[in-house]
Image (cartoon, coloured by chain):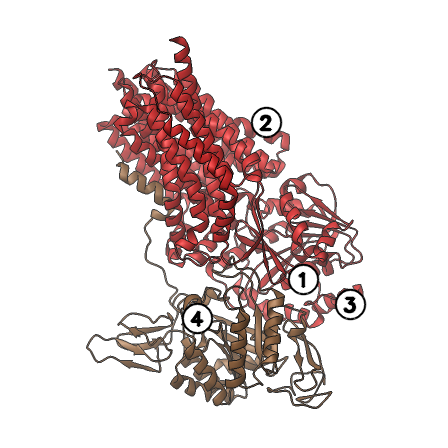
Amino acid sequence: MISRRTFMKTVCLTALALPAGARALAAGVAERREALWYQRLDDGTGRVRCALCPRRCTIAAGGSGFCRARKNVAGTLTSLGYGLPCSLNVDPIEKKPFFNFYPTTRSFSLACAGCNLRCRFCQNWEISQLSPLESRNYLTPVAQIPTLATAQGCRSVAFTYTEPTTYFEYMLDTARAARAKGVLAVTHSNGFINPEPQAELCRHLDAANIDLKGFSEKFYSSVCEGELAPVLAALQNYRKRGVWLEVTNLVIPGYNDSPAMIREMCGWIRQNLGEQTPLHFSRFFPLYKMTAVPPTPVKTLEMARETALQAGLHYPYIGNLPGHPGNSTYCPKCRKMVIRRSGFSVLETRLKGDRCSFCSRRIDGAGFMIGGMKI
Amino acid sequence: VNSSRLGRNGAARACAVTVGVSGIVAQTALLREILAQFSGNELYVGLIIALWIAAEALGALLAGRCAVIRRSPAASFINFTLVFSLTFPLCIFLTRSCKVIAALPPDQAATLPQVITIAAALLFPPAMAHGAQFVAATALFATLGGEPQAAAGRVYSLDTLGTIAGGGLASFVLIPWCTPFQSAALLLFGGGAVSLCLRWAPTADGRRISFGLPLILLLVGMLLLLYGGRLERLSLALQWQGKELLYSGNSPYQNIVVIHNQQQHTVYTDGRPLFTFPDADIEAAELFVHLPLLAHPAPQRVLLLGGGAGGLLTEILRYGSIRRVDYLELDPALTETIGRFADAASRQALADPRVKIHYRDVREFVRSSSDRYDVILIGMPLPDNLQENRCFSVEFLRRLATLLSGKGVVALLAPGSTAYYGPEMKRITESLLATFNAAFAHTLTVPGEQNLFLAANGFDPAELTAAEFAGRLAARGVRPRLISREHLGWLFDPTQLAWFHDNIGAGGVVNRDLEPYLLARQIFQTTATFSPELKPLLERLGKLTVTSLLPGVALLALVMAVVVRFRPKAALPYLIATSGCSAMILELALMLLFQLVHGTMIQTVGLLIALFMAGLWCGSMLTTAARDAARDFRWLAAGEAGFMLLCAALFLLFSASGFTTALSAAAAFALILPLLLLSGFLTGLQFPPAVRLFGGESSSGASSRAASFIYAFDLGGGCLGGFGGGLLLLPLLGFRATLLLLLLLKGGSFLVLHISAIGGRMKR
């Protein structure tokens, strides 16, 4: 007779009681690339310490870092995503978003699985919360990428969708190869990276869009499992090293939308990154684990943009809200609209070269001359 | 003596009925609350019901072992009623405040293990007390003299009657009109009144029940009635931490809440944001409306299946050519709420003379309509349950195709990606594509963060270029915010299309009425999103087939066949559990079939459940009185044979091609309703004889122990059937394979019953 305990257990667990078996991994034909920026710990355990991001994971032999993208293979830290992007696509550069950098050009966008944060609102959680060992990948050697990009009419290669820091070596080599062929290298990153590897990266990068997810340590720790301070340091470093910088802030109602927080953030950007830094306030929609948070009210986004303007920032934008005047670029001097956008489409421009056609003030950024713009 | 006997009988009957009423009222109310708190889907419904039944079974089992219940059943019944009636409102309060208590973020999804833990902690106290109430009521009947063996059967049938009545009461009166605290007050009054009746009805041992406990029940009920409003406000504030709540209410279909924030109103249904005013999701609304309307040369008649208030109607009405929009929405309370809280433009759109709102089931409307439409927009989200899956099956789409005018086009907007398709998203998208391809001559997918499917029979939408769309847009003088010549250029960029087709193949599984593949994948996708640790388990479950399950079922029968050679009685719980499981799955399958053919409104679901329960009641009444063991054995065997015949008949029926669409509504009534009655009847038939055979010819104590034990297995089987069958077997394997599995399951228990020869041995 079935014992009562077994019976109750079956009833309670039903479908969940089935044994979880070993997971079948889609093992890619990975190029075993040794990672940069780590030390072997000389304690005879075969452990290594990754020095790439502020987490500084200590990884036991056979184990992987927090990002799932860097694995200790017999005492050697391996970059699992190298040559194995899971995403390859062509996007308008405005979609990254870059609004003051080579507008209307196409960007060859790629990503390898993995991320060093755990944002509960992640848009690309299907790949960011995965290891390159688990994702379906395209075997793509570095040398192919500039050729693919130019063949698709792309002006730049973008490291995006997931966190590019986790595939640092692939990003670095690809950026170098792209630039050698006259293709620009841009990244959209969370800025959670250590200063030394960042300095190395900056030498090969043309532009970066960094998420400033909220302006408090509490937000970073409770919603992203990260820290704010290293992100701020990374932002300053990008600015210092002359990489064109745009900042994105996803405004989540009830989490990072207080006027005080936004004011403080805008002030910090103005002071540390400069008035020319474009700041994209992005509208939130219920996503991933944040399913019951309402969409950001338009009034909140308008308030944020107004705050940024008052803080002296020249290019605050409103994103994820097509058709709003905040999608467009305005001349900092005469306040006239110089690039009219809806969503990521450029509908009209009022520029003479890189200058405002009304008052001739230079519009900050780069690449306004190209891309078939109507001037 | 006669009159006091009559009084006792009446009081005992009232107790049994109260158990049924209060159980279903509390279960539905808590189900609603937990769903709204955790933004639950069908998986959660199954889970919550399974937990409730498991707790009831545990309560019944434990109470069955309690000697004190047999000594003073009336006092025990009142005690359990008190525990149940007090824990129910407490649980409502705790459900609403559980995220504060557990320090979970208020508006973020919890993982499945978190939900299970919290739901179990919340449901177990009232549900266990409720299970114990059943046992106490049985003991009460047993002390009334007459046949102790008949007591369980009688309580079972009265409890069933109470459940039918309570189901109606909950669906049509309590949920739409009362707060859960008012419902709890009502149950307290009911419990108090019944307890007072017991006070006046003398018990077997001559001792009278004190006034104290019944009065406490009535007093707490009174307090709850007085302060329920305050509790309601306080608990809602805890549930919606930090949000400004404008409205909260329940319709028979769902929980509706409106939140205000910075001049923006967001309407939530069952805890999930559905519509936002005044600024909807512009990107989705414009993509979904303008492309299909532009694909038609001159759209005049539009059929909008759900989702109209989310900016769709306003976008549709921008076109001057539109003469009529038929907008389907199931829940009048939802449009009423929207009417109250939407912005002026959305309200205007709802009141526009060209818009006709139909409060009808989509499938039923589509089946009975003979109108022709230029554009049909499927505005419902992808299916979360079998009922919704009916509107995404190839059978439904084929029917939809007959409503199209010559150049008519059908559109659906579904989640997509421009970066990566995970395995489940890939399967879901491929299934949608395959289903559209199977129903229409031409399907065009416009890929993006959301994929737009455009399907037609009269022309090929894929022949339209971005330039043609842009030209029509300009010619019609419509100026959307997002859709422009430039944006259309990107939407139709060859690299995007190539990338999509590189990721999404043509070999997807077609979603069918009786093989709801899309639903199974949707459930898996949602679960994996919130509980990534379950991914490996889900991967394995996803690979289940009927051939991988059949050996398990056969092995179980084999093991039981050996066990009953030594312990014949073991056949009984096995038989009752498999019957409970089969009956639940059959009930689900028949209800779904009825909905497929007839279309549904919540009232018909109530009718179907009532019908099943009525069958259950008839069955148990028929066999309550029988006493001879050989005869009991025959009842059980007849039940088994009946189950097998029913499964076989349904298997054959489901094998007839296209019958879900061919069957008329009248035929559905004539065919399915008797079958539902029959499956209930077979379940009810077996319970009393099984209890008698299990308890043997012994005292009332043994009989009530036996009743509680068998009852627990009945509930356990039902719970397995409801959860595993509704969520796993029917969606994943399809209806026919599931029936095959049930046929084998009941075949096994039929054989085991005969091997045990339990009736014959008892007689010897």
Residues indicated by labels 3 and 2 sit on the same polypeptide chain: yes
CA distance for labels 3 and 2: 55 Å
Q: Which residue is mark 4?
A: A220
Which quadrant does the N terminus of chain B fall into? Answer: top left
The secondary element bearing badge 2 is classed as helix
**Amino acid type, callout 4:** Tyr
* Number of numbered markers: 4
Residue position marked by numbered label 3 in the rendering: B474
Where disc 4 sits, the SS reads helix
| Residue under numbered circle 2 | B670
Q: Are circles 3 and 1 on residues that touch, CB within 8 Å?
A: no
Mark closest to the chain's N terminus, 1 or 2: 1
Mark 4 neighbour density, 10 Å: few (under 14) some (14–19) many (20 or more)? many
* Whether labels 4 and 1 share one chain: no
Of all residues shown, which one is farthest toward the left?
A44
Residue on which the image places disc 1: B286
